[in-house]
Image: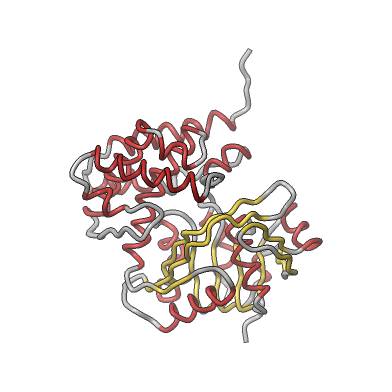
């Protein structure tokens, strides 16, 4: 028998939301956390506000090496340092591993650590924010999608999705998880880049004609990369990626985003991308593992994506300059 049914690597907003709901539903959950966050969990447990409102106790593991056997490992850390975070867990006996991080690099890292046969693809169209007092604001619960990396239906993906959904986090199994992951990634790259550069809530830069046009161009460039890799896109993402990439001109794509911006303003005026939360908190940005990953894949394919390259360089510069010590005279 496993020591735990679930282990959550990363006790930030997303990891806490998933872990708290599973623990409240009666599942044996271990949160892998360190430092001040681990101390908070040990003293107070997990407190969720917003779409759900409850507090639950949870087992906290400070040392990943102490995890010997687990049913499902869910990776919910930020992408920087993922390989290093997984290294102490490679000895762990597990049935399944999945990541709800941003970008497709996560599946490659999990496969390298645990073997591709144990890895499910996953994406989260779910949002939250870790507040200064240690509680988590649950702001969006559209769904977590899981599926086999090679496509098709499977009992294990269906069972995992049903377990998450029964616990209160909307989830579903998908036979086309690669399409869904890349559809989200194409949209996320544009949303992340504009969130960091405008420092505005989501609805504001979606509603501005200039920023919406830039975002549309980024999504369309990412669509070219997906196409070059032989990956189809879907509108079942945080933005309708397929429609944005197939719109007859930039004006049509821009108008689509302006409509979505108005919808965000009505339904989620406080929504902020996690990248904007990272900027304001002084945390490292997910640049190299996401925008950098896409830029490098395009380069190896001989694909010119100028908007992507420009925003990768700009966001990288923002990340470095805001965190480097000011030694000027």
Residue 71: quadrant of the picture:
bottom right
Q: Residue at x 72, y 53 (%)?
A: 134
Q: Residue furthest front?
A: 266
Q: Residue 231 or 259: which is nearer the viewer?
A: 259
- State left or right for residue 134 relative to residue 325: right
Q: Position of residue 242 (x, y in %)?
A: 27, 54
Q: Residue furthest bottom?
A: 1
Q: Residue 36 or 57: which is nearer the viewer?
A: 57
Q: How is the image coloured?
A: secondary structure
The quadrant in which the C terminus is found is top right
Q: Position of residue 142 (x, y in %)?
A: 48, 62
The quadrant in which the N terminus is found is bottom right
Total labels: the figure holds: 0
- State left or right for residue 255 relative to residue 272: left
Relative to 191, does residue 87 appear above or below in the rendering?
Answer: below
Q: Residue 109 or 283: which is nearer the viewer?
A: 283
Q: Position of residue 23 (x, y in %)?
A: 67, 73
Q: Residue furthest left?
A: 248
Q: Position of residue 78 (x, y in %)?
A: 54, 52
Q: Residue at x 38, y 48 (%)?
A: 293
Q: Residue at x 60, y 77 (%)?
A: 70
């Amino acid at each position: 028998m496993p020591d735990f049914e679930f282990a959550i690597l990363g006790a930030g907003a997303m990891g806490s939301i998933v872990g708290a709901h599973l623990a409240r539903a009666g599942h044996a959950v271990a949160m892998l956390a360190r430092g001040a966050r681990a101390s908070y969990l040990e003293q107070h447990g997990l407190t969720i506000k917003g779409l759900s409102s409850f507090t639950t106790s949870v087992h906290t593991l400070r040392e990943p090496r102490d995890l010997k056997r687990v049913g499902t490992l869910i990776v919910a850390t930020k992408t920087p340092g993922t390989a290093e975070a997984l290294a102490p867990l490679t000895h762990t006996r597990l049935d399944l591993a999945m990541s709800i991080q941003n970008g497709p690099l996560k599946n490659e890292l999990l496969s390298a650590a645990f073997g591709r046969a144990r890895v499910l693809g996953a994406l989260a169209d779910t949002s939250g924010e870790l507040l200064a007092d240690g509680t988590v604001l649950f702001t969006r619960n559209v769904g977590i999608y899981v599926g086999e990396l090679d496509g098709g239906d499977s009992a294990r993906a269906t069972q995992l999705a049903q377990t998450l959904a029964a616990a209160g986090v909307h989830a579903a199994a998908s036979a086309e998880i690669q399409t869904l992951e890349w559809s989200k990634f194409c949209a996320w790259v544009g949303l992340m880049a504009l969130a960091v550069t405008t420092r505005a809530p989501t609805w504001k830069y979606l509603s501005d004609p200039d920023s919406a046009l830039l975002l549309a161009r980024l999504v369309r460039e990412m669509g070219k990369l997906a196409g070059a890799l032989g990956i189809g896109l879907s509108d079942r993402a945080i933005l309708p990626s397929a429609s944005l990439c197939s719109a007859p001109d930039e004006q049509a794509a821009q108008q689509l985003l302006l409509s979505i911006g108005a919808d965000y303003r009505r339904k989620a005026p406080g929504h902020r991308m996690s990248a904007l939360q990272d900027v304001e908190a002084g945390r490292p940005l997910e640049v190299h593992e996401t925008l950098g990953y896409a830029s490098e894949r395009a380069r190896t394919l001989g694909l010119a994506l100028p908007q992507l390259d420009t925003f990768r360089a700009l966001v990288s510069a923002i990340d470095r300059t805001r965190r480097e010590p000011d030694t000027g005279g």
